[in-house]
């Protein structure tokens, strides 16, 4: 290394590893990474096998480049912004201008986009991880109900959590790493319904996790009455 103006400068020539110099065009998979367009690359990261992952904001995808130089899409639908697909294949789900990315050793990753939410992809399946369904700010609270707006960066701290730049809210915030801490608790909000003499009224409940879960969460429920009578005042249900 040479020394220039008090800073270390590496001597060498930049080498193109991803991109063909264009921001539009055909967007194929399983081709040389240097033959694909890149339209506003965001955050990048490596897994333990040396695969490179990066967000492509204006193609609305996350892509993976192998050590051998082959590129594939691992989340999102090219040129298809949206906010759907949870619980299914990550390559069928829609992202919207993804930028923030944290890559885990086994190739799982967390991606944050302009929907104000984070989603985690593991074994090819995408699941909600943090953030409400719409961008905004509603204070700090349960990880699944907290709003973010303009997430741009995910960085792991030495203490084992993730720092989030919440750009439009003017904040840096923290969310837990997958599998960190104790088992999250499940809470349900209170709902009041005024009984009428005719028709049907619905009570809508919201379930929230106290922290992100590293695996899918299941629960059972059953309705019961204290002063109300099943069949007359309400319809009993369970699942």
Image: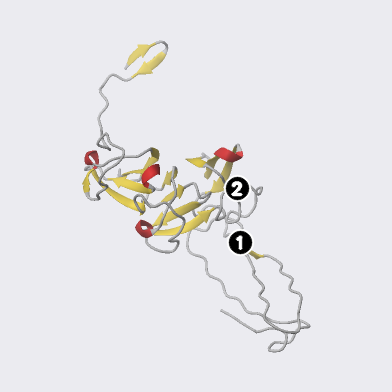
Label located before the other in sequence (2 or 1): 2
* Quarter of the figure with the N terminus: top left
> How far apart in space, not on screen, are marks 2 and 1 (Cα)?
18 Å
The image shows residue 185, relative to residue 22, as above or below, that is below
Q: Identify the residue at horizontal 23%, vertical 38% (top origin).
A: 34
Q: Identify the residue at horizontal 51%, vertical 50% (top origin).
A: 115
Q: Identify the residue at horizontal 37%, vertical 61% (top origin).
A: 89
Regarding residue 167, the answer to whether it shows in the image is yes
Residue identified by numbered label 2 = 136
| Quarter occupied by residue 20 | top left
| Quarter occupied by residue 235 | bottom right
The image shows residue 16, relative to residue 64, as above or below, that is above
41 or 194: nearer the eye? 194
- Outermost right residue: 227
Residue identified by numbered label 1 = 208
The image shows residue 209, relative to residue 118, as above or below, that is below
- Outermost front residue: 198
95 or 186: nearer the eye? 95
Regarding residue 56, the answer to whether it shows in the image is no
From the viewer's perspective, tell me whether residue 19 is left or right of residue 151: left
- Local crowd at mark 1 within 10 Å, few (<14), some, or many (≥20)? some
The image position of residue 53, as x and y in percent, is 35, 44
212 or 35: nearer the eye? 35
97 or 158: nearer the eye? 97
* Quarter of the figure with the C terminus: bottom right
Q: Decide: marks 2, 1 in contact (CB < 8 A)?
A: no
Way the structure is coloured: secondary structure
- Local crowd at mark 2 within 10 Å, few (<14), some, or many (≥20)? some
Secondary structure of residue under mark 2: loop
């Amino acid at each position: 290394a040479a020394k220039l103006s008090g800073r270390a400068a590496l001597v060498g020539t930049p080498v193109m590893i991803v991109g063909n110099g264009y921001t539009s065009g055909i967007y194929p998979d399983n081709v040389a990474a240097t033959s694909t367009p890149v339209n506003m690359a965001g955050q990048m990261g490596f897994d333990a096998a040396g695969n490179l992952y990066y967000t492509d904001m204006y193609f609305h995808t996350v892509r993976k480049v192998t050590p051998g130089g082959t590129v594939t899409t691992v989340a999102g639908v090219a040129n298809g912004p949206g906010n759907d697909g949870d619980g299914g294949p990550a390559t069928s789900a829609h992202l919207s201008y993804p930028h923030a990315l944290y890559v885990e050793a086994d190739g799982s990753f967390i991606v944050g986009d302009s929907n104000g939410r984070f989603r985690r992809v593991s074994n090819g399946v995408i699941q909600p991880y943090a953030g409400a369904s719409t961008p905004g700010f509603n204070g700090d609270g349960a990880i699944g109900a907290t709003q973010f707006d303009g997430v741009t960066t995910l960085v792991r701290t030495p203490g084992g959590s993730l720092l989030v730049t919440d750009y439009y809210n003017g904040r840096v915030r923290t969310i837990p790493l997958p599998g960190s801490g104790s088992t999250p608790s499940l809470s349900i909000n209170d709902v009041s319904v005024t009984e009428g003499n005719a028709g049907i009224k619905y009570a809508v409940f919201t379930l929230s996790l106290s922290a992100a879960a590293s695996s899918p969460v299941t629960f059972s429920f059953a309705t019961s009455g204290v002063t109300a009578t099943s069949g007359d005042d309400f319809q009993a249900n369970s699942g």
